[in-house]
């Protein structure tokens, strides 16, 4: 997992190869992201009349705590080539604000 922060949003990238988008369940709260999925892969090869079969399967669940509050109902998701990218807009009061400090 890779979490980057900009002034407006958090960008979370997760590598989840070999899983269809329909097999992912993503839930976002103001403080965390929960990702659950199930891998179901079957690979068969046939050589000289012998069949070799390989299965990979299993469930996973990951919760990623967020360093600032986000507006969960404005989350944008993209899933391409096994990379899930979530853009999570920061809550207005948690955006980094710059204050000028006056020296006297």
Image (cartoon, rainbow, N blue to C red):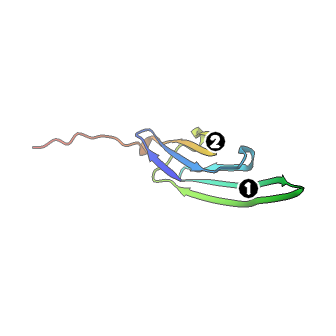
Residue depicted at x 54% and y 49%: 30
Local crowd size for mark 1, using a 10 Å CA cut-off: few (<14), some (14–19), many (≥20): some
Residue depicted at x 61% and y 39%: 78
* Circle 2 SS class: loop
In the rendered image, the vertical position of residue 52 relative to residue 6, given as above or below = below
| Residue closest to the far front | 48
Q: Which mark is residue 66?
A: none
Give the image location of residue 48, x and y in percent.
Answer: 87, 55
Closer to the camera in the image, 49 or 92: 49
Q: Report the quarter where the C terminus lies.
A: top left
Closer to the camera in the image, 16 or 88: 16
Give the image location of residue 42, x and y in percent.
Answer: 80, 54
| Residue closest to the far left | 104
| Residue closest to the far right | 49
- Compare marks 2 and 1 and give the one earlier in the sequence: 1
Mark 2 and mark 1 residues within 8 Å of each other at the beta carbon: no
Residue depicted at x 77% and y 54%: 41
Say which quarter of the image contains residue 75. top right
Residue identified by numbered label 1: 38
Local crowd size for mark 2, using a 10 Å CA cut-off: few (<14), some (14–19), many (≥20): few
Task: Answer left or right for 100 relative to 39.
Answer: left
Give the image location of residue 36, x and y in percent.
Answer: 68, 55
In the rendered image, the vertical position of residue 97 relative to residue 54, given as above or below = above
Residue identified by numbered label 2: 81
Say which quarter of the image contains residue 56. bottom right
Give the image location of residue 64, x and y in percent.
Answer: 55, 56
């Amino acid at each position: 997992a890779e979490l980057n922060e900009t002034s407006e949003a958090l960008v979370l990238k997760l590598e989840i190869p070999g899983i269809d988008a329909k097999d992912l369940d993503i839930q976002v709260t103001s403080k965390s992201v929960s990702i659950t999925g199930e891998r179901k892969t079957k690979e068969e090869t046939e050589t000289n009349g012998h069949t070799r079969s390989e299965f990979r399967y299993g469930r996973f669940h990951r919760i990623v705590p967020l360093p600032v509050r986000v507006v969960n109902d404005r989350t944008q998701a993209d899933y391409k080539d096994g990379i899930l990218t979530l853009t999570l807009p920061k809550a207005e009061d948690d955006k980094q604000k710059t204050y000028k400090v006056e020296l006297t």
